[in-house]
Amino acid sequence: MATIAVIGANGTIGRRVVSEALSRGHQVTAVVRNPAGYTPPSPDVTVVAGDVLDPEDVARVAAGQDVLVSAVGGGGGNGEGHAALIEPAARALVEGLRTLGGAAPRLIAVGGAGSLETAPGVRVWDAPGLPDWLLRTMHAHGDAQEYYNTVADVRWTVLSPAATIEPGERTGGYRTGTEQLVTDAEGASYITTEDYAAALVDEIETPRFTGRRFTVAR
């Protein structure tokens, strides 16, 4: 059993990560900005307040945990408001964990698909016709990824989703990649939030991508 704190536990992805981790017997702390407005899926979940943009808050909620999951900035609605916090959140997460030194938990952050390659030198965000709000979110995740790539003193992993991620069935099946978008035989790239959460908790239980980014799709 691992102790896992999930920042952004009230979001679309965060809720699935909390439920998936609970279903496997892990001890979960849900970190949200407003605990009064959050109903955990089980009384076994500890709920605390925390601000992902405050390194002191990050250090406080991370202390004593095995893993810190950041599900902040995963999107929602039309993405407005998310892009501006993605890269600053990455910096605050690392800064906060650094203050814990060797006692810092491993960090697993929800990433974006925009910077994944679809062909040599071509990325998802290069596709024509993408709306401005989506491009802003994609590039913000790309900036955060560039920052994480410079970090060597904190154990981190970024999990990028498929090109399309939405609530659906949990199958527990998925394929992994690293810097290239994972697609099926028809060229589609898809994952449910439930299978994404399963992949994230799988990485908690059996680390394979420490210090790097990986991606999943069905």
Image (cartoon, grey):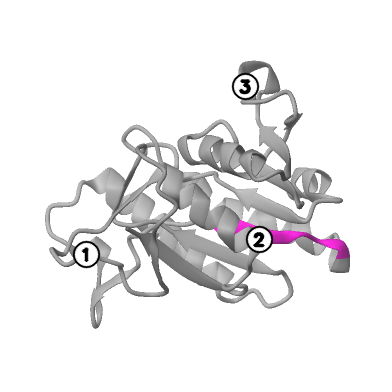
What percent of the width, then of the height, locates residue 33?
Answer: 65, 30
- Under mark 2, the amino acid is Glu
Compared across the picture, whether 5 is left or right of 119 comes to right
Residue that sits furthest to the bottom in the current view: 120
Q: Is mark 1 on a helix, strand or loop?
A: loop
Question: Closest to the observer: 60 or 9?
Answer: 9
Residue 179 shown in magenta:
no
Q: Which one is earlier in the sequence, the residue at label 1 or at label 2?
A: 1
Residue 107 shown in magenta:
yes
Residue range corresponding to the magenta coloring: 103-109
- Per the image, the residue denoted by label 1 is 184
- Under mark 1, the amino acid is Asp
- Residue displayed at 81% across by 61% down: 104
- Residue displayed at 36% across by 40% down: 169
- Per the image, the residue denoted by label 3 is 38
Would residue 217 be seen by someone viewing this image from the given angle? yes
The residues bearing labels 1 and 3 have C-alpha atoms spaced at a distance of 37 Å
- Residue displayed at 69% across by 36% down: 31
